[in-house]
């Protein structure tokens, strides 16, 4: 099998966003496009030479082709051993775990997360490093630099690996091991949760409905919930991964998984309803009669974490991304543990996790996870909720009510304005940034603006600084309005507006979420004028 150097011309658009490089499938299918990006990784991350590399993806269209190319290139670039999920399948948290388990130097995850798949859909690559976390901004910056000047890439020609056959194979001098996609991940979860108690909960009639949305978590959910925990077969729906995700949009939220909300509201709905996204790192949680917002889920998990075997007496710190509601801060205060506010994107939690300062962290975008891996972990969150239901004997509704009574409640919503002209979105940001200093002290109804600025973050471990991480208008503890540009889109620009309102006492239980947020939306409109500046009367999506 000859190793060849193929001359190439660089592309100029291979800049990674919030979570890797994400583009339309057609962009990835351009000649040498994928190869160039991969070669840039191999050129920059020299620790991969002679080391182990984990490869897998969410099963979407183009996954298998991309994995074959990645294996042939890894072999040509001196990677000693490649571990790949059977059929090319690995969820993002499972891949992160394999990197840690095998002390690999990194991992290539082929996914565009929840973005639609298929020939007209999206494709993407997340590059994770030793330790299991996503490449830092500094590293992706270097990879981007390299991608703009590349002149050749290396590949082993004429290879074809049998991705479906488990066991050892060889490409040139490189060992390739095709492994069960689920096994090690399932074992990790068993080490964290009380599977016996959860099994008992199912036996006593506890009911779960998990929607894998025809994406990567199907095999994981079937193995863990049905085979290992004894849940009835009907507990997992859409459990077969499809290349086009069944033409769906595996973004588990109140819009794209509205059928789950309807199920939760039905008279005799299951006790716990949940879903995960394309690559298995997000989670959506509902109980009978209510939806638990991701910020609330994070706070409630934090408050009950001590009841879970893997975490008893071990809670160090808590963290959330800046736009995530401040519910978890209340729990951190009550428990007397440190609480961090990081920029959007899971990579910003990783240094704190590695330093042993964090146990649990989350994002408003349906991401929750703990120190057990270096990615958010959808099924982990579902198992954590199941375990809490099993040990407390409470319903989701009772847990939420008790939590809001004790800690107060953060009403919360995110409004997305998708596919805007880039210049328009930038202008909205620029306008607010300029206006910010003059907003401080302004009164709006009962609220006063205490802070209005652009968020920047200094990593407490390595001192690196991330600037321009979103604009925030803060009304003390009472409310926040946040505006930022998405870094994961593949078409135009997306503006995200986040609204948060905190109430205690009777007001914590009295309102519907959208009622509570209506006055804040009016203030946001007055201050930011998104409708006026973009011509969009309403957001594309509210979650
Ligand atoms: C979004 C979310 C962010 C999340 C990222 C990746 O980024 O807001 O919280 O970490 O997606 O999620 P942005 O820049 O579009 O707001 V995933 O499930 O694609 O790894
Ligand atoms: Co995802």
Image (cartoon, helix red, strand yellow):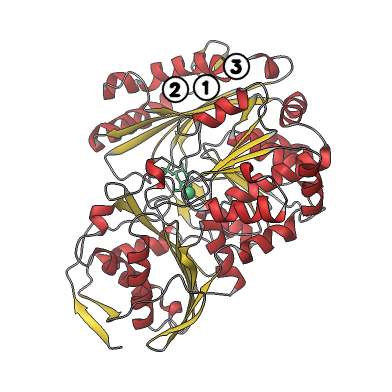
Badge 3 density bin: few <14, some 14–19, many ≥20, Cα 10 Å: few
Residue assigned mark 1: 449
The quadrant in which residue 527 appears is top left
Q: Secondary structure at mark 1?
A: loop
Q: Which quarter of the figure is the N terminus placed in?
A: bottom left
Of labels 3 and 2, earlier in sequence is 2
Residue 80 point in image, percent of width and height: 46, 84
Of labels 2 and 1, earlier in sequence is 2
Q: Secondary structure at mark 3?
A: loop
Q: Secondary structure at mark 2?
A: helix
Q: Which mark is residue 512?
A: 3
In-front residue for pair 207/350: 207
| CB-based contact (under 8 Å), mark 3 and mark 1 | no
Residue at position x 26%, y 58% in the image? 28
Of labels 3 and 1, earlier in sequence is 1
| CB-based contact (under 8 Å), mark 2 and mark 1 | yes
Residue 263 point in image, percent of width and height: 59, 28
Give the side of residue 496 with respect to residue 122, left or right: right
Residue at position x 72%, y 32% in the image? 396
In-front residue for pair 386/312: 386
Residue assigned mark 2: 439
Between circles 3 and 2, the one closer to the viewer is: 3
Query: Alpha-carbon distance for marks 3 and 1?
Result: 24 Å
Looking at the rendered structure, the number of numbered marks drawn on it comes to: 3
Q: Is mark 2 within 8 Å of ligand 1?
A: no
Residue at position x 65%, y 37% in the image? 297
Q: Is residue 317 above or below residue 272?
A: below
Give the side of residue 482 with respect to residue 103, left or right: left
Q: Which mark is residue 437?
A: none
Give the side of residue 107 with respect to residue 375, left or right: left
Query: Alpha-carbon distance for marks 2 and 1?
Result: 7 Å
Residue 119 point in image, percent of width and height: 27, 50
């Amino acid at each position: 099998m000859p190793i060849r150097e193929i001359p190439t011309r660089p592309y100029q658009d291979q800049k990674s966003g919030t979570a890797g490089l994400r583009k339309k499938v057609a962009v990835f299918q351009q000649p040498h496009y994928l190869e160039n990006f991969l070669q840039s990784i191999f050129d920059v991350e020299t620790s991969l030479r002679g080391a182990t590399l984990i490869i897998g993806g969410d099963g979407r269209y183009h996954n298998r082709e991309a994995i074959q190319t990645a294996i042939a290139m890894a072999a040509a670039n001196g990677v000693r051993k490649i571990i790949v999920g059977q059929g090319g399948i690995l969820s993002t948290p499972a891949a992160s775990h394999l990197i840690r388990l095998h002390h690999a130097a990194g991992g290539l995850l082929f996914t565009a997360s929840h973005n639609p798949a298929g020939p007209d859909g999206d494709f993407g690559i997340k590059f994770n490093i030793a330790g299991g976390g996503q490449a830092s901004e500094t590293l992706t910056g270097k990879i981007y630099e390299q991608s703009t000047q590349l002149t050749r890439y290396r590949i082993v020609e004429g290879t074809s690996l049998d991705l479906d056959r488990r066991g050892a194979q060889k490409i040139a001098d490189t060992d390739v091991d095709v492994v069960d996609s689920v096994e090690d991940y399932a074992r990790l979860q068993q080490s964290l949760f009380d599977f016996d108690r959860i099994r008992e909960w199912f036996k006593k009639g506890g009911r779960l409905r998990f929607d894998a949305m025809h994406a990567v978590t199907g095999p994981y959910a079937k193995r863990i919930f049905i085979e290992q925990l004894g849940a009835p077969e009907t507990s997992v729906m859409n459990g077969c991964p499809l290349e086009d995700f069944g033409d769906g949009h595996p973004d588990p939220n109140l819009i794209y998984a509205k059928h789950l909300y309807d199920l939760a509201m039905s008279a005799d709905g299951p006790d716990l309803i949940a879903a995960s996204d394309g690559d298995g790192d997000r989670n959506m949680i509902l109980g009978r009669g209510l939806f638990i917002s991701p910020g609330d889920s994070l706070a409630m998990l934090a408050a009950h974490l001590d009841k879970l075997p893997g975490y008893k007496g071990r809670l160090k710190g808590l963290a959330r991304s800046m736009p995530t509601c401040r519910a978890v801060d209340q729990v951190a205060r009550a428990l007397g543990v440190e609480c961090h506010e990081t920029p959007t994107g899971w990579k910003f939690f990783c240094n704190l996790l590695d330093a042993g300062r964090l146990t649990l962290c989350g994002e408003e975008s349906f991401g929750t996870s703990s120190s057990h891996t270096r990615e958010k972990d959808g099924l982990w969150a579902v198992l954590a909720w199941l375990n809490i239901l099993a040990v407390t004997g409470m319903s989701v509704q009772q847990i939420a009510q008790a939590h809001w009574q004790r800690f107060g409640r953060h009403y919360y919503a995110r409004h997305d304005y998708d596919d805007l002209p880039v210049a328009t979105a930038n202008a909205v940001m620029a306008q607010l940034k300029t206006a910010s200093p003059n907003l401080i002290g302004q009164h709006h109804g009962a609220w006063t603006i205490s802070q209005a600025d652009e968020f920047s973050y200094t990593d407490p471990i390595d001192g690196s600084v991330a600037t321009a991480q979103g604009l925030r208008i803060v009304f003390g503890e009472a409310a926040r309005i946040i505006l930022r540009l998405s870094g994961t889109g593949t078409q135009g620009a997306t503006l995200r507006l986040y609204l948060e309102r905190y109430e205690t006492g009777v007001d914590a239980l009295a309102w519907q979420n959208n009622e509570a947020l209506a006055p804040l939306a009016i203030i946001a409109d007055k201050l930011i004028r998104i409708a006026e500046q973009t011509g969009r009367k309403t957001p594309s999506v509210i979650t």
